[in-house]
């Protein structure tokens, strides 16, 4: 007969991931530690060998596809093998590693295939592309980040499923394993940082006698194997003492859970403020989608720090925490709706870009949390629906990550296809097609589309065909920008108010510098890359009408005509974004108020916006 030990004892772990797996047949603890250290040392040696091949341009460096696959396998598989030892049966561990190796290799192959654009480039761009070793050997940042995140989720799910002996494990097992892996990785990094601090101190001491010690620890043959070995040792040390990890996790989550009321108060205040100011100030930030999605992610993380593996009696009894959790579950939905609207506005105006495609996929994942957490409010007092929602969202994140790293949902492919479709449908003119994006950010798909455009013999596309030919033979993006012909004249993108009025010709014909009288000149007066709104105004005491220009990227400026008929910037108005929206409404409604003062100060309701006078341009010594 076995005796069960109460899980409430502080010295013993209570979570699924903190107990010894009764199913796995593992070696003795000593042999496990030796095997883990051997794997870490082997990882460091392989990384050093790859570094030598890359620096010497020999061996695997001559075969970019193979080099990239081996590099990613050496980076990701050893930590997974180390964390799985003693928790997974050897046969299942071998199958798991083989499956991951096949997935990593396939994604690495596609990553290098999508960047293989040599078949469509012309000289001198082709020679520059062929000689760019880093481009061929280094995996893309998108691949590394998504693979790291996806493998973490997959590893936590695999360990939990193996321990529970079923395909879909219990939520407490998922929760415990995920947090255990997070803390193990964090302490391994901390251990490595402490190790290298000690080594650097030793190098400083021995430098008094000889620089040999510093030369040794700075050599790749030393620091690569040592760093990998130290990381493996730290993972082993944190794994053989599961009670320490469990207690640290409980302490960390308990402390951070008290940040949820503050976050809820801030987000709720933000949403309440939008009811007063309207949505225009939010749209004018031009980064509303990223901010809203980031806020949603913060609420989800903090809510799960309170919920943990199920709402505990302690959390349920704390009224402030309990009500903060319930409010936090209701807030993501309006944030996701606003993020969707903000993204929809940008897409309808400018089409899809890789960043907007990624934002749309993030909105899809965030929608699962938003709808699921809102449903959890109505099902039970302990909000048990949060558990299956988190599991479903995790599987969705895995699916989205794989889709992004394959042709299925490659952001570059989707963005290029959308730009070409907008061109064919007439939504954009040939002059407005972003050739620079297609060439340098559209990967294989964008370059191939430019090559197809070159083959089109349509007189209406002659300008675009020349741009595409130039892009396919240009080495760098800045060279393409320098050689590109200007579209229209500066000032042509200025929207005049009231409708039917015209911007004075002297403003359009003047050549504006970036700075005029110590004030930033709106971009719409210097190029056609940006647009702005201009309003004809007549402040009190002014003899003639003046022009007030509002540019979303710089402060509003006031222009006036001097005695010689030259238009100059006489002042700027610096104000927060919500005041800009009020200023537009006042100008369009002809209710703008000016304060009686030597300078033209604005009054928006109870807020006074002083004008900062523009200083005369300083003359050089030669003048």
Image (spheres, rainbow, N blue to C red):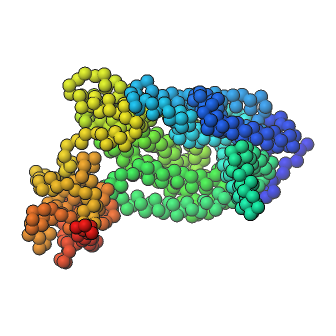
| Residue beneath the point at 80% across and 53% down | 12
Q: Is residue 476 above or below residue 493?
A: above
Instruction: Give the x, y percent position of residue 515.
Output: 27, 61
Q: Quadrant of residue 31?
A: top right
- Closer to the camera in the image, 121 or 365: 121
Work out whether residue 18 or residue 568 is closer to the camera in this orientation and state it.
568
Above or below, 531 relative to 410: below
- The image quadrant that residue 321 belongs to is bottom right
* Residue occupying image coordinates x 83% and y 41%: 34
Q: Give the left or right position of residue 193, taking residue 148 as reference.
A: right
Closer-to-camera residue (606/548):
548
Q: Is residue 436 visible?
A: yes
Q: Is residue 554 above or below residue 457?
A: below
Q: Whole-percent x and y of residue 224?
A: 70, 44
Q: What residue sits 59% from the left and 63% below the top?
A: 258
Residue 614 visible in the current orientation: no
Whole-percent x and y of residue 319?
58, 63
Q: How many marks?
A: 0
- Left or right: 348 with respect to 323? left
Q: Quadrant of the C terminus?
A: bottom left
Q: Nearer the viewer, residue 574 or 362?
A: 574
Left of 2 or right of it: where is 347? left
> From the viewer's perspective, is 178 left or right of 560?
right
Rendered location of residue 596, percent (x, y): 18, 77
Can you say which quadrant of the picture contains the N terminus?
top right
Please report the residue visible at 59 percent of the width from the left and 52 percent of the height from the top: 304
């Amino acid at each position: 007969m076995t005796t069960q030990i109460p899980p409430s004892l502080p010295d013993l772990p209570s979570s699924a991931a903190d107990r010894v797996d009764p199913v796995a047949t593992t070696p003795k603890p000593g042999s496990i530690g030796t095997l883990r250290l051997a794997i870490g040392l082997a990882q460091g040696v392989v990384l050093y060998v790859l570094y030598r091949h890359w620096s010497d341009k020999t061996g695997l460096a001559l075969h970019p596809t193979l080099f990239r696959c081996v590099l990613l396998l050496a980076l990701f598989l050893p930590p997974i093998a180390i964390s799985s030892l003693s928790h997974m049966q050897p046969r299942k561990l071998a199958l798991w590693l083989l499956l991951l190796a096949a997935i990593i290799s396939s994604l690495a192959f596609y990553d290098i295939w999508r960047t293989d654009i040599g078949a469509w480039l012309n000289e001198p761009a082709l020679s520059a592309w062929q000689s760019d070793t880093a481009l061929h050997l280094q995996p893309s940042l998108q691949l590394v980040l998504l693979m790291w995140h996806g493998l973490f989720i997959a590893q936590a799910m695999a360990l939990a499923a193996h321990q529970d002996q079923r395909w879909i494990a219990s939520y407490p097992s998922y929760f415990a394993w995920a947090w255990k892996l997070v803390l193990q990785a964090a302490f391994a990094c901390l251990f490595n940082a402490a190790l290298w601090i000690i080594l650097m101190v030793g190098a400083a001491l021995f430098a008094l006698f000889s620089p040999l010690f510093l030369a040794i620890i700075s050599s790749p043959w030393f620091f690569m194997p040592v760093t990998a070995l130290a990381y493996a040792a730290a993972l082993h040390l944190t794994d053989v003492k599961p009670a320490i990890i469990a207690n640290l996790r409980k302490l960390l989550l308990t402390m951070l859970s008290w940040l949820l009321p503050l976050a809820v108060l801030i987000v709720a205040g933000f949403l309440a403020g939008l009811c007063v100011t309207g949505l225009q100030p939010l749209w004018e930030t031009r980064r509303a989608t990223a901010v809203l999605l980031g806020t949603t992610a913060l609420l989800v993380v903090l809510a799960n720090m309170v919920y943990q593996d199920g709402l505990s009696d302690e959390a349920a009894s704390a009224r402030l925490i309990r009500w903060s959790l319930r409010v936090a579950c209701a807030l993501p939905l309006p944030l996701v709706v606003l993020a969707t609207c903000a993204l929809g506005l940008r897409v309808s105006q400018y089409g899809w870009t890789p960043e907007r495609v990624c934002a749309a996929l993030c909105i899809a994942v965030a929608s699962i949390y938003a709808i699921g957490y809102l449903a959890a409010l109505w099902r039970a007092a302990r909000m048990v629906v949060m558990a299956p929602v988190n599991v479903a969202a995790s599987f969705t994140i895995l699916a989205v990550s794989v889709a992004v790293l394959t042709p299925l949902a490659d952001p570059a492919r989707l963005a290029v296809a959308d730009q070409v479709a907008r061109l064919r449908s007439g939504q954009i003119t040939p002059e407005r097609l972003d050739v620079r994006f297609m060439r340098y950010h559209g990967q294989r798909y964008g370059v191939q589309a430019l090559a197809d455009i070159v083959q089109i013999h349509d007189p209406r596309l002659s300008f675009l065909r020349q741009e595409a030919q130039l892009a396919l033979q240009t080495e760098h993006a800045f060279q393409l920008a320098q050689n590109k012909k200007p579209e229209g004249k500066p000032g042509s993108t200025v929207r005049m108010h009231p409708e039917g009025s015209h911007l004075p010709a002297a403003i359009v014909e003047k050549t504006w510098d970036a700075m005029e009288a110590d004030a930033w000149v709106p971009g719409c007066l210097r190029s056609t890359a940006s647009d702005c709104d201009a309003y004809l105004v007549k402040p009190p005491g002014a003899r003639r009408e003046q022009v007030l220009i509002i540019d979303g990227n710089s402060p509003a400026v006031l222009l006036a005509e001097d005695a010689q008929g030259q238009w100059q910037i006489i002042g700027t108005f610096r104000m927060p974004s919500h005041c800009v929206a009020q200023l537009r409404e006042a100008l369009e409604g002809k209710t703008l108020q000016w304060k009686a003062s030597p300078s033209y100060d604005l009054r928006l309701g109870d807020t006074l916006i002083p004008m900062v006078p523009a200083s005369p341009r300083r003359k050089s010594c030669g003048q």
